[in-house]
Amino acid sequence: MSRAPAPAVRQAAAEIEQLGYDTLWFGEAQGGREAFSAAGILLAATERISVATGIANIWVRDATAMAAGGRALGEAYPGRFALGIGVSHAPLVSQRGHDYTRPLAAMSAYLDAMDTAARDLPFTDDPPTPRLLAALRPRMLELARDKADGAHPYFVPLEHTVLARKTLGPGPILAPEQAVVLERDPARAREIARGHMAGYLRLPNYVNNLRHLGYEDDDFVGGGSDRLVDAIVAWGDAEAVARRINAHLDAGADHVAIQPLPPDLRGGVAQLAELASALGVRPGGGPGPVPGEG
């Protein structure tokens, strides 16, 4: 969604809201739209749906700018904005001239600086804007528990949701992402999934997290083994995909950010429309927060 023209983004956001989804997640991809400007476009184009950054990169803006952006949107659209932030990945950060040597320490210091800056900001976001961390491994999950409102794990299998909830405890928000393909043919579904996964499997953060969960070298070859593909991407008919999403909720997730594949805008909206009935989402708002990711 971050790379599509603004008129198409506005139309898609309004359609997703009309379907009944409660939250719209979006990323800050390289070469795409800046996170806070994108959030403003989405919020202005809709009336009810919440908007969440998944994620805003801490190396793109300093802590004061991040705090100010989050609080300003929270004040302008009460209860409709959530700020997901993350440390990104070493190859991407180094391209911007930053040092990725100690990402956990960098995030901890950044959160402290955000809190300090927030005390002097004129904005009154009521209710307070939730702050979620892109957290995969235990120490970042602990930081999400201790210095944020929860975690937004990306590119994770179901077993990660179980471990994340155990680490976070019962209070913090847990909102994992789940990639989906509405395709019943196994070969075609896995082909689409591997096209999505190949780039992520070149990033050490994701691979190291999967190793921590028990996946091995053979699982990372050729865009991913069948075992890994099926764990990362839910595929099949709408009912099969809905079962995976509900499994995350049963495992302790509060929200599931649904990422339809392939990620073209119109195809994504169509897949969300097909999924809505199986998920129990109805126009005007579903029974619970089931975020969609564009």
Image (tube, grey):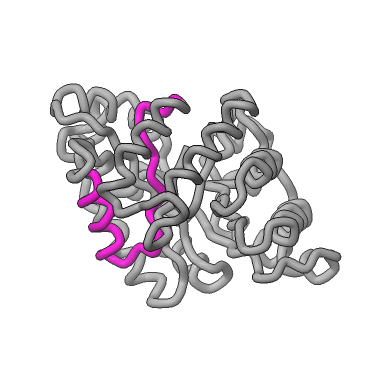
Res 57 quadrant in image? top right
Res 261 quadrant in image? top left
Q: Nearer the viewer, residue 167 or 122?
A: 122
> Height in image: 275 above or below 6?
below
Q: Which residues are magenta?
A: 241-264
Q: Check the image and name the residue furthest to the front.
A: 283
Q: Nearer the viewer, residue 242 or 165?
A: 242
Residue 136 part of the magenta segment: no
Res 129 quadrant in image? bottom right
x%, y% of residue 158? 26, 54
x%, y% of residue 36? 69, 44
Residue name at image x 62 percent, y 63 percent: 79
Left or right for 186, reference 231: left
> Height in image: 264 above or below 288?
above
Residue name at image x 52 percent, y 33 percent: 12
Q: Nearer the viewer, residue 286 or 26?
A: 286
Q: Nearer the viewer, residue 217 or 262?
A: 262
> Height in image: 48 above or below 60?
below
Residue 197 in view: yes
Residue 248 part of the magenta segment: yes
The number of numbered badges drawn on the structure is 0
x%, y% of residue 139? 45, 64
Residue name at image x 18 percent, y 36 percent: 236
x%, y% of residue 102? 56, 53
Left or right for 228, reference 286: left
Residue 102 in view: no
Residue name at image x 48 percent, y 37 percent: 294
